[in-house]
Image: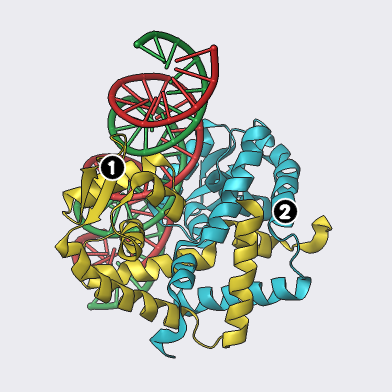
Chain colours: A yellow, B cyan, C green, D red
Amino acid sequence: MSNNQFKRGELYSFITGKASTAIARRLQKKFNAANLNLTIEQWSVLYHLWKQDGISQQELGNASFRDKPSITRLVDNLEKLQLVKRVSSESDRRMNLIYLTKQAQKLQEQTMELANETLNEALEGVSPDRIDVCREVLQIVYDNLK
Amino acid sequence: MSNNQFKRGELYSFITGKASTAIARRLQKKFNAANLNLTIEQWSVLYHLWKQDGISQQELGNASFRDKPSITRLVDNLEKLQLVKRVSSESDRRMNLIYLTKQAQKLQEQTMELANETLNEALEGVSPDRIDVCREVLQIVYDNLK
DNA sequence: TTTGGATAGTTGTATAAACAACTATATGTC
DNA sequence: GACATATAGTTGTTTATACAACTATCCAAA
Protein backbone atom coordinates (compact mmCIF):
# COMPACT_ATOMS: atom_id res chain seq x y z
CA MET A 1 0.00 0.00 0.00
CA SER A 2 1.48 3.32 -1.03
CA ASN A 3 1.96 6.23 1.30
CA ASN A 4 0.26 8.43 -1.24
CA GLN A 5 -3.03 6.76 -0.56
CA PHE A 6 -4.08 9.28 2.08
CA LYS A 7 -4.74 12.92 1.49
CA ARG A 8 -3.82 15.10 4.41
CA GLY A 9 -7.32 15.88 5.59
CA GLU A 10 -8.31 12.25 5.69
CA LEU A 11 -5.23 11.29 7.58
CA TYR A 12 -5.86 13.86 10.25
CA SER A 13 -9.52 12.89 10.62
CA PHE A 14 -8.75 9.21 10.96
CA ILE A 15 -6.11 9.75 13.60
CA THR A 16 -7.89 12.35 15.70
CA GLY A 17 -11.25 10.59 15.48
CA LYS A 18 -13.26 13.72 14.72
CA ALA A 19 -16.48 11.75 14.21
CA SER A 20 -16.38 9.68 17.38
CA THR A 21 -15.35 12.74 19.38
CA ALA A 22 -18.36 14.59 18.02
CA ILE A 23 -20.66 11.69 18.94
CA ALA A 24 -19.28 11.49 22.48
CA ARG A 25 -19.66 15.25 22.96
CA ARG A 26 -23.24 15.18 21.75
CA LEU A 27 -24.08 12.35 24.13
CA GLN A 28 -22.36 14.13 27.01
CA LYS A 29 -24.48 17.20 26.31
CA LYS A 30 -27.60 15.07 26.45
CA PHE A 31 -26.47 13.65 29.80
CA ASN A 32 -25.84 17.15 31.11
CA ALA A 33 -29.18 18.43 29.82
CA ALA A 34 -30.88 15.55 31.65
CA ASN A 35 -28.95 16.45 34.83
CA LEU A 36 -27.41 12.98 34.91
CA ASN A 37 -24.06 14.11 36.37
CA LEU A 38 -22.30 11.30 34.56
CA THR A 39 -19.31 11.37 32.21
CA ILE A 40 -19.20 9.34 29.00
CA GLU A 41 -16.28 7.40 30.42
CA GLN A 42 -18.21 6.54 33.58
CA TRP A 43 -21.18 5.57 31.41
CA SER A 44 -18.97 3.29 29.32
CA VAL A 45 -17.98 1.41 32.48
CA LEU A 46 -21.61 1.07 33.57
CA TYR A 47 -22.37 -0.12 30.04
CA HIS A 48 -20.21 -3.22 30.57
CA LEU A 49 -21.62 -3.83 34.03
CA TRP A 50 -25.14 -3.73 32.62
CA LYS A 51 -24.08 -6.55 30.32
CA GLN A 52 -22.39 -8.45 33.14
CA ASP A 53 -22.46 -7.36 36.77
CA GLY A 54 -19.84 -8.29 39.34
CA ILE A 55 -16.80 -8.56 37.09
CA SER A 56 -13.28 -7.62 38.16
CA GLN A 57 -11.52 -4.34 37.47
CA GLN A 58 -9.18 -6.21 35.16
CA GLU A 59 -12.08 -7.55 33.13
CA LEU A 60 -13.62 -4.10 33.03
CA GLY A 61 -10.33 -2.78 31.69
CA ASN A 62 -10.16 -5.43 28.97
CA ALA A 63 -13.75 -4.80 27.96
CA SER A 64 -13.46 -1.04 27.87
CA PHE A 65 -9.93 -0.94 26.44
CA ARG A 66 -8.42 0.86 29.43
CA ASP A 67 -5.38 0.19 31.57
CA LYS A 68 -5.53 -0.69 35.26
CA PRO A 69 -4.90 2.79 36.67
CA SER A 70 -7.67 4.24 34.51
CA ILE A 71 -10.12 1.68 35.85
CA THR A 72 -9.00 2.26 39.44
CA ARG A 73 -9.81 5.94 39.15
CA LEU A 74 -13.04 5.48 37.21
CA VAL A 75 -14.25 3.02 39.84
CA ASP A 76 -13.14 5.48 42.55
CA ASN A 77 -15.34 8.15 41.02
CA LEU A 78 -18.25 5.77 40.37
CA GLU A 79 -18.07 4.71 44.02
CA LYS A 80 -18.18 8.35 45.13
CA LEU A 81 -21.30 8.77 43.00
CA GLN A 82 -22.67 5.63 44.69
CA LEU A 83 -23.17 3.92 41.36
CA VAL A 84 -20.92 0.90 41.99
CA LYS A 85 -19.45 -0.99 44.93
CA ARG A 86 -16.11 -2.75 45.18
CA VAL A 87 -16.44 -6.19 46.75
CA SER A 88 -13.29 -8.12 47.49
CA SER A 89 -13.42 -11.55 45.86
CA GLU A 90 -13.51 -14.44 48.33
CA SER A 91 -11.85 -16.87 45.94
CA ASP A 92 -8.99 -14.52 45.07
CA ARG A 93 -8.31 -11.75 47.47
CA ARG A 94 -6.34 -9.76 44.90
CA MET A 95 -9.50 -9.06 42.95
CA ASN A 96 -12.25 -6.52 43.43
CA LEU A 97 -15.58 -7.48 41.96
CA ILE A 98 -17.55 -4.44 40.86
CA TYR A 99 -21.29 -4.41 41.46
CA LEU A 100 -23.90 -1.95 40.29
CA THR A 101 -26.00 -0.21 42.89
CA LYS A 102 -29.77 0.09 42.52
CA GLN A 103 -29.25 3.69 41.51
CA ALA A 104 -27.01 2.63 38.61
CA GLN A 105 -29.45 -0.04 37.49
CA LYS A 106 -32.05 2.68 37.13
CA LEU A 107 -29.81 4.66 34.78
CA GLN A 108 -29.63 1.98 32.12
CA GLU A 109 -32.82 2.58 30.24
CA GLN A 110 -32.60 6.37 30.16
CA THR A 111 -28.96 6.55 29.10
CA MET A 112 -29.28 3.86 26.45
CA GLU A 113 -32.20 5.79 25.03
CA LEU A 114 -30.06 8.95 24.86
CA ALA A 115 -27.21 6.99 23.27
CA ASN A 116 -29.50 5.59 20.58
CA GLU A 117 -30.92 9.04 20.00
CA THR A 118 -27.39 10.40 19.53
CA LEU A 119 -26.48 7.71 17.03
CA ASN A 120 -29.67 8.32 15.09
CA GLU A 121 -28.79 12.01 14.84
CA ALA A 122 -25.20 11.20 13.90
CA LEU A 123 -26.14 8.76 11.14
CA GLU A 124 -29.06 10.67 9.71
CA GLY A 125 -29.02 10.44 5.94
CA VAL A 126 -26.64 7.47 5.83
CA SER A 127 -28.03 4.30 4.32
CA PRO A 128 -27.90 1.12 6.44
CA ASP A 129 -25.55 -0.65 4.06
CA ARG A 130 -23.08 2.23 4.19
CA ILE A 131 -23.26 2.17 7.98
CA ASP A 132 -22.48 -1.54 7.80
CA VAL A 133 -19.43 -0.97 5.62
CA CYS A 134 -18.18 1.75 7.96
CA ARG A 135 -18.70 -0.44 11.01
CA GLU A 136 -16.87 -3.34 9.39
CA VAL A 137 -13.94 -1.16 8.36
CA LEU A 138 -13.60 0.24 11.88
CA GLN A 139 -13.69 -3.28 13.30
CA ILE A 140 -10.90 -4.36 10.93
CA VAL A 141 -8.87 -1.29 11.92
CA TYR A 142 -9.27 -2.20 15.55
CA ASP A 143 -8.35 -5.85 14.94
CA ASN A 144 -5.34 -4.84 12.84
CA LEU A 145 -3.91 -2.73 15.64
CA LYS A 146 -4.87 -4.35 18.91
CA MET B 1 -34.95 5.89 12.00
CA SER B 2 -35.75 3.32 14.63
CA ASN B 3 -33.87 2.92 17.87
CA ASN B 4 -33.62 -0.76 17.18
CA GLN B 5 -31.17 -0.11 14.40
CA PHE B 6 -28.14 -0.49 16.65
CA LYS B 7 -27.08 -3.59 18.43
CA ARG B 8 -25.30 -2.96 21.68
CA GLY B 9 -21.78 -3.73 20.56
CA GLU B 10 -22.00 -1.40 17.61
CA LEU B 11 -23.37 1.38 19.70
CA TYR B 12 -20.53 1.20 22.17
CA SER B 13 -17.86 1.12 19.47
CA PHE B 14 -19.27 4.11 17.66
CA ILE B 15 -19.45 6.24 20.76
CA THR B 16 -16.14 5.33 22.32
CA GLY B 17 -14.23 5.47 19.05
CA LYS B 18 -12.31 2.24 19.59
CA ALA B 19 -10.77 2.38 16.13
CA SER B 20 -9.50 5.95 16.20
CA THR B 21 -8.20 5.44 19.74
CA ALA B 22 -6.26 2.41 18.55
CA ILE B 23 -4.81 4.40 15.65
CA ALA B 24 -3.74 7.25 17.92
CA ARG B 25 -2.12 4.85 20.38
CA ARG B 26 -0.21 3.09 17.64
CA LEU B 27 1.08 6.40 16.28
CA GLN B 28 2.06 7.52 19.79
CA LYS B 29 4.08 4.34 20.22
CA LYS B 30 5.89 5.04 16.98
CA PHE B 31 6.68 8.56 18.19
CA ASN B 32 8.00 7.14 21.46
CA ALA B 33 10.04 4.48 19.71
CA ALA B 34 11.61 7.21 17.58
CA ASN B 35 12.38 9.23 20.74
CA LEU B 36 10.31 12.11 19.44
CA ASN B 37 9.02 13.24 22.85
CA LEU B 38 5.81 14.49 21.28
CA THR B 39 2.19 13.74 22.11
CA ILE B 40 -0.40 13.06 19.43
CA GLU B 41 -2.25 16.16 20.55
CA GLN B 42 0.86 18.30 20.18
CA TRP B 43 1.46 16.72 16.79
CA SER B 44 -2.07 17.56 15.72
CA VAL B 45 -1.40 21.23 16.45
CA LEU B 46 1.87 21.17 14.51
CA TYR B 47 -0.06 19.45 11.70
CA HIS B 48 -2.20 22.56 11.20
CA LEU B 49 0.78 24.89 11.46
CA TRP B 50 2.58 22.91 8.76
CA LYS B 51 -0.40 23.64 6.53
CA GLN B 52 -0.46 27.32 7.54
CA ASP B 53 2.10 28.91 9.80
CA GLY B 54 1.46 32.01 11.90
CA ILE B 55 -2.26 31.55 12.60
CA SER B 56 -3.94 32.59 15.85
CA GLN B 57 -4.76 30.34 18.77
CA GLN B 58 -8.43 30.79 17.95
CA GLU B 59 -7.88 29.56 14.39
CA LEU B 60 -5.85 26.65 15.70
CA GLY B 61 -8.74 25.78 17.98
CA ASN B 62 -11.26 25.88 15.15
CA ALA B 63 -9.03 23.77 12.93
CA SER B 64 -8.28 21.16 15.53
CA PHE B 65 -11.74 21.11 17.10
CA ARG B 66 -10.53 22.26 20.53
CA ASP B 67 -11.65 25.00 22.88
CA LYS B 68 -9.53 28.00 23.84
CA PRO B 69 -8.16 26.69 27.14
CA SER B 70 -7.04 23.47 25.48
CA ILE B 71 -5.10 25.45 22.88
CA THR B 72 -3.60 27.74 25.52
CA ARG B 73 -2.13 24.76 27.33
CA LEU B 74 -1.05 22.89 24.23
CA VAL B 75 0.77 26.00 23.02
CA ASP B 76 2.28 26.39 26.51
CA ASN B 77 3.72 22.89 26.26
CA LEU B 78 4.82 23.30 22.65
CA GLU B 79 6.64 26.51 23.66
CA LYS B 80 8.40 24.67 26.49
CA LEU B 81 9.53 22.10 23.94
CA GLN B 82 10.71 25.02 21.77
CA LEU B 83 8.56 23.86 18.88
CA VAL B 84 6.45 27.02 18.50
CA LYS B 85 6.62 30.69 19.43
CA ARG B 86 3.81 33.00 20.43
CA VAL B 87 4.05 36.37 18.64
CA SER B 88 1.62 39.09 19.62
CA SER B 89 -0.22 40.36 16.55
CA GLU B 90 0.55 43.96 15.66
CA SER B 91 -2.83 44.58 14.04
CA ASP B 92 -4.82 43.15 16.98
CA ARG B 93 -3.04 42.98 20.26
CA ARG B 94 -5.52 40.46 21.64
CA MET B 95 -4.21 37.81 19.30
CA ASN B 96 -1.16 35.59 19.51
CA LEU B 97 0.14 34.35 16.20
CA ILE B 98 1.77 30.96 16.52
CA TYR B 99 4.91 30.28 14.53
CA LEU B 100 6.84 27.05 14.07
CA THR B 101 10.48 26.97 15.09
CA LYS B 102 13.11 25.46 12.81
CA GLN B 103 13.13 22.44 15.07
CA ALA B 104 9.39 21.88 14.46
CA GLN B 105 9.78 22.33 10.73
CA LYS B 106 12.25 19.47 10.78
CA LEU B 107 9.69 17.16 12.41
CA GLN B 108 7.18 17.34 9.60
CA GLU B 109 8.58 14.79 7.21
CA GLN B 110 9.42 12.16 9.82
CA THR B 111 6.12 12.36 11.69
CA MET B 112 3.99 12.39 8.55
CA GLU B 113 5.83 9.29 7.42
CA LEU B 114 5.01 7.58 10.72
CA ALA B 115 1.39 8.69 10.46
CA ASN B 116 1.07 7.26 6.95
CA GLU B 117 2.72 4.07 8.11
CA THR B 118 0.21 3.81 10.95
CA LEU B 119 -2.75 4.27 8.64
CA ASN B 120 -1.39 1.68 6.23
CA GLU B 121 -1.14 -0.80 9.09
CA ALA B 122 -4.61 0.13 10.32
CA LEU B 123 -6.27 -0.26 6.95
CA GLU B 124 -4.43 -3.35 5.79
CA GLY B 125 -6.80 -5.68 4.01
CA VAL B 126 -9.47 -3.03 3.45
CA SER B 127 -10.23 -2.20 -0.15
CA PRO B 128 -9.92 1.46 -1.26
CA ASP B 129 -13.61 1.76 -2.08
CA ARG B 130 -14.58 0.54 1.40
CA ILE B 131 -12.15 3.03 2.92
CA ASP B 132 -13.88 5.71 0.85
CA VAL B 133 -17.31 4.73 2.11
CA CYS B 134 -16.07 4.74 5.69
CA ARG B 135 -14.43 8.15 5.28
CA GLU B 136 -17.60 9.58 3.73
CA VAL B 137 -19.80 8.19 6.50
CA LEU B 138 -17.53 9.63 9.19
CA GLN B 139 -17.59 13.00 7.43
CA ILE B 140 -21.39 12.96 7.36
CA VAL B 141 -21.47 12.04 11.06
CA TYR B 142 -19.22 14.97 11.82
CA ASP B 143 -21.30 17.35 9.70
CA ASN B 144 -24.52 16.10 11.27
CA LEU B 145 -23.29 16.88 14.77
CA LYS B 146 -21.01 19.88 14.57
C1' DT C 1 7.73 -25.19 52.43
C1' DT C 2 10.15 -21.84 50.43
C1' DT C 3 10.95 -19.04 46.72
C1' DG C 4 10.33 -16.68 42.44
C1' DG C 5 7.39 -15.19 38.95
C1' DA C 6 2.79 -13.80 37.54
C1' DT C 7 -1.41 -11.26 38.38
C1' DA C 8 -4.71 -7.56 40.55
C1' DG C 9 -4.91 -3.40 42.08
C1' DT C 10 -3.06 1.39 43.78
C1' DT C 11 -0.34 5.60 43.71
C1' DG C 12 2.58 9.33 41.66
C1' DT C 13 3.36 12.34 37.90
C1' DA C 14 2.63 14.46 33.36
C1' DT C 15 -0.50 15.68 29.68
C1' DA C 16 -5.02 16.75 28.02
C1' DA C 17 -10.18 18.07 27.75
C1' DA C 18 -14.49 20.41 29.49
C1' DC C 19 -16.45 24.18 31.75
C1' DA C 20 -16.73 28.51 34.22
C1' DA C 21 -14.78 32.77 35.48
C1' DC C 22 -11.60 36.03 34.50
C1' DT C 23 -8.47 39.99 31.94
C1' DA C 24 -7.35 42.65 28.03
C1' DT C 25 -8.33 44.54 23.73
C1' DA C 26 -11.25 45.81 19.88
C1' DT C 27 -15.43 47.70 17.84
C1' DG C 28 -19.84 49.73 16.96
C1' DT C 29 -23.20 53.16 18.59
C1' DC C 30 -24.79 57.02 20.90
C1' DG D 1 -15.09 60.30 23.31
C1' DA D 2 -17.81 56.99 26.41
C1' DC D 3 -19.98 52.91 26.94
C1' DA D 4 -21.82 48.35 25.87
C1' DT D 5 -20.68 44.32 23.72
C1' DA D 6 -17.93 41.00 21.39
C1' DT D 7 -13.59 38.65 20.83
C1' DA D 8 -8.80 36.53 22.18
C1' DG D 9 -6.56 34.51 25.48
C1' DT D 10 -5.56 32.86 30.48
C1' DT D 11 -6.42 30.56 34.90
C1' DG D 12 -8.74 27.33 38.19
C1' DT D 13 -10.94 23.01 38.93
C1' DT D 14 -12.46 18.33 37.83
C1' DT D 15 -12.10 14.22 35.19
C1' DA D 16 -9.53 11.14 32.35
C1' DT D 17 -5.34 8.78 30.15
C1' DA D 18 -0.42 6.99 29.85
C1' DC D 19 3.43 5.22 32.01
C1' DA D 20 6.33 3.71 35.80
C1' DA D 21 6.83 2.10 40.34
C1' DC D 22 4.78 0.07 43.99
C1' DT D 23 2.01 -3.53 47.33
C1' DA D 24 -0.54 -7.65 48.01
C1' DT D 25 -1.82 -12.06 46.73
C1' DC D 26 -1.63 -16.26 44.15
C1' DC D 27 0.59 -20.27 42.23
C1' DA D 28 3.91 -23.45 40.57
C1' DA D 29 8.43 -25.56 40.79
C1' DA D 30 12.31 -26.85 43.44
Q: Is residue A101 left or right of residue B28?
A: left
Pick whichever, A45 or B20, lies toward us: A45
Chain letter for mark 2: B
Q: Is residue B76 left or right of residue B40?
A: left
Q: Residue C21 in the image: state x and y as whole percent.
A: 19, 52
Residue A36 in view in this figure: no
The residue at 49%/86% (across/down) is: A124
The residue at 70%/44% (across/down) is: B111
Secondary structure under tag 2 reads: helix
Pick whichever, B107 or B2, lies toward us: B2
Chain letter for mark 1: A
Pick whichever, B137 or A141, lies toward us: A141
**Do the residues at pointers 2 and 1 share their chain?**
no
Front: mark 2 or 1: 1
The residue at 21%/61% (across/down) is: A37
Question: Which residue is label 1 attached to?
Answer: A96
Please identify the quarter of the rendering in which residue C8 is found.
Answer: top left
Q: Residue B27 in the image: state x and y as whole percent.
A: 63, 46
In the drawing, what numbered circle is on residue B121?
2
* Amino acid of disc 2: Glu
The residue at 65%/69% (across/down) is: A137
